[in-house]
Amino acid sequence: MTDAPALVLTGPPSLAPLLARGALLSPFKRPAPDAEFPRTRLVLPGLRVDLARLAAYERVCGFPTGEDALPLTYPQVLGFPLAMRLMSGRDFPLPLLGLVHTSITVTRHRGMPATGAYELAVRVDGLAPHRRGTEATVVTEVREGGDVVWESSSTYLARHRTRRPAEAPGASGVSGASEEEVRKPLPTVAEWRLAEDVGRRYAAASGDRNPIHLHPLTARLFGFPRAIAHGMWTLARCLAAHGTPDSCHARAAFKAPVLLPGTVTYAAENDRFELRDGDERVHVAGDVYPA
């Protein structure tokens, strides 16, 4: 969909009205993998990073502060308002409320100075059936001087009843035993105690104020016993601990929510990393390696 019609914006969209619009429209959405979806590519040129907000993000995620370099995950934060504008619209078929971030792939082609000027572009790349509903793929690209320097592809799941054939004998999960399931557990590197306010601190730095992350009372409205950590915070925290070269490729699957407050185990070996709980359930599984 790189030939999608472009809509050039004059500034980042304001998130609060988009969240409100998405919440109000959610009950009227009818998700399906063959539904129509917005084909417009939103473009924001001349973007400069708010260094104070970046520092707050670095602190809550565990990245070093004060360096003239964007953390690998920060461009996703910059693109979030554009993604929200697309996903909160009437022409986006999945309800914003209850939408689950299930995976992300990120490629950074070179180091990105925090003081640079960038062009953002975000589009919905398509819909696909999932065993639990319908998944949308959202692509974010960052250009500097006309060159793509960073890009990501995220999947978001809307859960609903599906009609699908019975699984073959012996099948489990999405399509049988996954690669992570047959691998031996990664060695433990650290144990992290997560404070109850991590969701609110990350929301203030990133702008993602989904109520499931902010307070136990609002999280319970969506079926969670306590507030849960943002998936992108869990990934950023893992990558801050792992380290990332200037030119690299990272992938992550968000497998289970992290309840706040709580204690998690960070495990890593070579290119791979995981975030697990005390029962060895995997919350996040991913890898990062030079591009």
Image (spheres, rainbow, N blue to C red):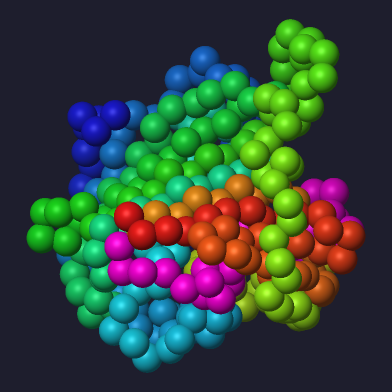
Q: Is residue 70 visible?
A: yes
Place residue 280 in its image quadrant.
Answer: bottom right
Q: Quadrant of residue 65?
A: bottom left
Q: Position of residue 72 (x, y in %)?
A: 40, 66
Instruction: Classify residue 50 as left or right of residue 220.
Output: left
Q: Quadrant of the N terminus?
A: top left
Residue at far bottom of view: 66
Picture layout, residue 287 above or below residue 102: below
- The residue sitting at 72% across, 26% down in the picture is 176
Q: Quadrant of the C terminus?
A: bottom left
User: Residue 234 lies in what quarter of the image?
Assistant: bottom right
Q: Is residue 3 left or right of residue 150?
A: left
* Position of 54 relative to 154 (above/below): below
Residue 188 in the figure: left or right of residue 80: right
Q: Is 256 a magenta residue?
A: no
Q: Is residue 232 visible?
A: no
Residue drawn at the location 87% of the way across and 66% of the way down: 278
In front of the other: 108 or 229: 108
Report the residue at 60% width, 64% height from top: 269
Q: Looking at the picture, tell me which residue is in the foreground, 179 or 84.
A: 179
Q: Residue 246: x and y, percent?
A: 31, 69
Q: Magenta stretch containing residue 233, yes or no?
A: yes
Q: Which residues are magenta?
A: 219-247
- Please identify the residue farthest to the top as the structure is shown: 165
The one nearer the camera, 201 or 259, is 259
**Horizontal side, residue 181 vs residue 289: left or right:** right
